[in-house]
Amino acid sequence: MRPSPRPRQGAFGSFGGRFAPELLTPALEELETARREIVPTTAFRSELDREARDWVGRPTPLTRAPRFSERAGLETVFKREDLLHGGAHKANNVLGQALLARHMGKSRLIAETGAGQHGTATAMIAARFGMEAVIYMGEKDMERQAPNVKRMELCGAEVIPVKAGARTLKDAINEALRDWTASLATTHYLLGTAAGPHPFPRLVRDFQAVIGREAKRQWRREFGGLPDVVVACVGGGSNAIGIFHAFVPQKSVRLVGVEPGGAGLDSGRHGATLVRGTPGLLHGARTMVLQDEEGQILEPHSISAGLDYPGVGPEHAHLQEIGRARYVAATDEEALAAFEVLSATEGIVPAFEPSHALAYVLRARQSGEIPAGSRVLLNLCGRGDKDLETYFSLGRSS
Amino acid sequence: MREIGFPYSDPIADGPAIQAAAGRALARGTSTRRGFELLAAIADSCPGIPLNLLVYGNLVHRIGYERFTDTVSQAGASTLLVPDIPLEEARPLRRACRRAGIGHVELAGPLTPGPRLNRLAEDSAFVYLAGFQGVTGVRHGGFTTVLRRVTEVAGKVDVPVCLGFGLSGRDQIESAFGAGARIAVVGSHLVRVVERLYRSSGDAADLLAGYRSAVLGLTAEE
């Protein structure tokens, strides 16, 4: 088979690109121009830094985890994105994009959300900036994540139930793209992950890359040198690309992304797009996707609504293709066990999403996936309050 | 011209009517393979009438551009429109269409600037102009603006202009032709007709008769 051509715009190797209808081209070009011309300016950077400090709560600390490390048999340090305003790394991206939207003269923000974290973050920033916010959320996710729906509405956002398809994240993205096609003159689509058509994967990565930049500096100061392994969970991939980006040039640092293995990779009920998917076009990019043999997109499964996505950011597909990062999966069961271990050993209740990354670290020493004596940096990208109801409904006894 | 669309799980350029139709079709087991059989049957039964296939990029990408366009050509379609593979990414697809002997169609919109229209029209069998800025089957604003845009685009490009998105009546089609369009596509409206007939009667003969009268209502004098 002939190698796949490199996309013409926004390529990451053979992945990425702008596979979106012509009617969206004006909006995507306007956004790309703004990304190039506004984001690098001193005025924008200083506004971003100030709001990141005063409203979002940056910098976040690195936290040593001696009791967790002992359980894992690996020295593990957490980057504490769970301490950000809103309880997850999502705030980094919504702040950057909302500021940019304001500079572009847009008064309305639209967003998709699965678990409700990105929708909540968007609703928060819209309230702060006095902008209108419309959040598309699958009807099924609205039932699963009712408290987050209330939180968005409390911040003044309108939450629109999406009844198409499986009524989850994928369908919410479709609906947001459709809204944007008709409303682009006044509206910015605040995409929540490092996926979608160019320039979104770069835009989101650049706003999330602060995680890795900070962590690298803090690690050097506190521990000296560099971590041996950097681990993060991957759904769409924004927290992972955020912490990986600064370390990509340092070849000695192993990068590991952990995908949702759901009920097990062989069960077919999982969201392990990079581990088990094939190349395809989804939501505007060429990337790895879960699809059938004719190219219909499949429904993923994960205990974590935030990782429940049949595609992935194209830069991850590229990092996997060139062998720079490795992608593995952790099952629902492994993630739940890790959720319990971290709560009990360190007094930190993590979100289900980073629980997948924690699960990998807990098994990696024994499975030989990480050599003994390695120092691990893990992106603890969100706190677990939102998952408590689901957790208790499972009736587990830890 | 006849236009056939293959159902896809994530039709981001389509409004509610076509989304629901794709969902129904997929839920009942329609596949790309069966789509091609239908395409061939239609091409055989009406020789000489151009047949445009509208299909989302992932269905083409999955099978491979060359294999897909060869199959389109063998089934008897004359042109192919892939709404989510825009100009910049279309080169390999255009090459595959040329090789397979079918025309490639580019989508344009109300905001597509002049120089870009000319680039879209180059090597394109026709330009498929979306009358409204939005998804299929949903109208935003008045039809007069649409007609002005048709005339503007028809004056700029050397290939036929096809008007689509939000058309539902014979008077609109006639005024589109009057404004310089050579083709007009009625999609969502007919899909809604099928949906209504399908719900009110499961009988194939009723469905065909009802559909026929809806189509005749668009094309013939009363």
Image (cartoon, grey):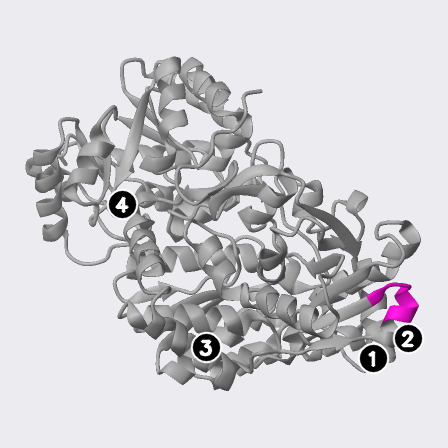
What amino acid does circle 4 point to? Phe
Q: What x and y, as percent, mark residue B66?
A: 47, 20
User: Residue A328 at what x, y percent from top left?
Assistant: 75, 49
Q: Secondary structure at mark 4?
A: loop
Q: How packed is label 2: few (under 14 Cα within 10 Å), some, or many (20 or more)?
A: few
Give the image location of residue A221, x and y in percent. Answer: 68, 73
Quadrant location of the C terminus of chain A in the rendered image: bottom right
Q: In whole angstroms, how far apart are the C-alphas of marks 4 and 2?
A: 57 Å
The residue identified by callout 1 is A346
Residue assigned mark 2: A398
Q: Counting residues from the N terminus, which is met first, the one under dot 2 or under dot 1?
A: 1
Residue A255 lies left or right of residue B44; in this view the side is right
The CA span between labels 3 and 2 is 41 Å
Q: What residue is disc 3 on? A: A49
Q: Which residues are magenta?
A: A69-75
Q: Nearer the viewer, mark 3 or mark 2?
A: 3
Q: Quadrant of residue B113?
A: top left
In terms of secondary structure, where does tag 2 sit? loop
